[in-house]
């Protein structure tokens, strides 16, 4: 079932946090914990994968979030059945987090914003007013339509908005719940952001008892969801089985069917958006390696494609660029649909399959403009376009 979601109230609230006529910005209230893993937004890049320190913190079993159940504690599923819409559906806005490494990758972000600001309002989450002022000037210099850019003051830890940002689940009547699972240990400002947004707009925040990132979840808008089997390992402390993961997705995300495909071997995030892209109701693009480039992951992605076909999806295959013996996983599927456009990452390091990949996306999105975005620098940190954006659908 497709849900029609109204975001007029949400956008009105966001407008209250955007730039005012005199250039000032408003702020969201932060959580009780500052991000221990936070780096310098001008120089450091925290990767899309957990750092060694974060892995050690989790292994030690001391999670300060447990002391603040009202901010980080798990909640019951929504009392009214709600579901996440497909990312290919029309959207009003998407979020970008101006966290560690954002300035270093400013041109990459500017290309995303410039391509999107004529389609939607782009909401950038910046740490302070000084950053907002500097970014406003820089983006205007890149030729961005600043009339469709708004900024919110909130100190996110990282740029990986897809992984910690709010997934909106809607009931059949359009009532919204912002789903906020637990994010990486130490990135506590990131983790709190969906709840902060929900509090600002008077929406309920639903916090399922699972550790997961938004990059490892996609919905086709009709109750069919796709993720990877990395969720089982990620939640070893809970002892969850694949069946448990599917049950949680059903309760909190409205997934009537969840296909858990194999995660890429050697790829640090385990996220589904590194190899799969849902393009419509019951339609999906799945990556494809040649045996010469990566024989192990060629088999895994063939298995993923077959599993999705068995679950009723129309499957298109897209070639995968080289992954440098599994050190850097370049991915075309880490793309973003923005109303009349689709932003597709491309790589100067390997252009062998670029035209073939774009042709596959054009077949999947025949009425939309494809916008290639150079993503060589950002992919070194285990993510591309999809990983740094979080959309709202209507």
Image: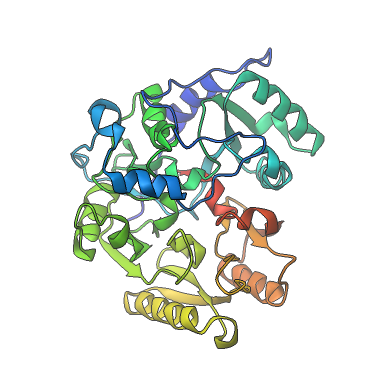
Residue 115 picture location, percent across and down: 70, 47
Quadrant holding the C terminus: top left
Residue 343 picture location, percent across and down: 63, 56
Relative placement, left or right, of 311 versus 371 is left
Relative placement, left or right, of 319 versus 252 is right
Residue 49 in view of the camera: yes
Report the coloring of the rendering.
rainbow
Residue 223 in view of the camera: no
Residue lying at 69% horizontally and 44% vertically, measured from the top left: 105
**Which residue in the rendered view is the most extreme toward the top?**
22
Residue 321 picture location, percent across and down: 63, 73
Quadrant holding the N terminus: bottom left
Residue lying at 60% horizontally and 68% vertically, measured from the top left: 361
Residue 60 picture location, percent across and down: 29, 44
Front in this rendered view, residue 355 or 83:
355
Residue 194, quarter of the rendered image: top left
Front in this rendered view, residue 117 or 317:
317
Residue lying at 67% horizontally and 44% vertically, measured from the top left: 109
Residue 323, quarter of the rendered image: bottom right
């Amino acid at each position: 079932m497709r849900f029609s979601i109204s975001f007029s109230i949400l956008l009105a609230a966001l407008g209250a946090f955007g730039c005012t006529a005199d250039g000032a910005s408003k702020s969201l209230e932060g959580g009780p914990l500052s991000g221990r893993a936070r780096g310098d937004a001008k120089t450091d890049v925290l990767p899309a994968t957990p750092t060694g320190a974060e892995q050690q913190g989790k292994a030690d079993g001391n999670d300060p979030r447990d002391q603040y159940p009202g901010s980080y504690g798990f909640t019951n599923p929504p009392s009214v059945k709600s579901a996440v819409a497909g990312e290919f559906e029309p959207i009003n806005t998407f979020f970008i987090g101006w966290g560690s490494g954002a300035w270093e990758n400013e041109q990459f972000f500017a290309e995303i914003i410039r391509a999107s600001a004529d389609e939607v309002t782009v909401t950038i989450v910046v740490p302070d007013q000084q950053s907002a002022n500097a970014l406003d000037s820089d983006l205007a210099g890149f030729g961005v339509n600043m009339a469709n850019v708004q900024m919110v003051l909130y100190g996110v830890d990282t740029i990986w908005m897809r992984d910690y940002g709010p997934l909106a689940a809607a009931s059949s009547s359009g009532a919204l719940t912002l789903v906020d699972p637990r994010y990486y240990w130490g990135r506590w400002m990131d983790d709190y952001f969906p709840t902060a947004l929900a509090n600002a707009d008077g929406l309920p925040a639903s916090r399922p008892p699972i550790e997961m990132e938004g990059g490892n979840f996609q919905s086709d808008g009709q109750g069919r969801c796709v993720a990877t089997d990395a969720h089982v390992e990620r939640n070893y402390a809970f002892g969850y089985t694949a069946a448990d993961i599917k049950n949680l997705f059903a309760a909190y995300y409205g997934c009537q069917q969840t296909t858990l495909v194999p995660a890429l071997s050697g790829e640090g995030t385990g996220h589904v958006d590194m190899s799969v892209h849902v393009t419509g109701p019951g339609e999906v693009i799945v990556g494809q390696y040649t045996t010469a480039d990566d024989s192990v992951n060629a088999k895994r992605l063939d298995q993923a494609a077959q599993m999705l076909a068995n679950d009723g999806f129309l499957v298109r295959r897209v070639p995968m660029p080289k992954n440098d013996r599994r050190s850097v996983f370049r991915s075309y599927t880490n793309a973003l649909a923005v109303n009349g456009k689709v932003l597709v990452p491309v790589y100067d390091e390997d252009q062998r399959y670029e035209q073939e990949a774009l042709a596959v996306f054009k077949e999947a999105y025949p009425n939309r403009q494809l916008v290639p975005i150079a993503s060589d620098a950002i992919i070194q940190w285990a993510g591309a376009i999809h990983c740094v954006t979080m959309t709202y659908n209507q």
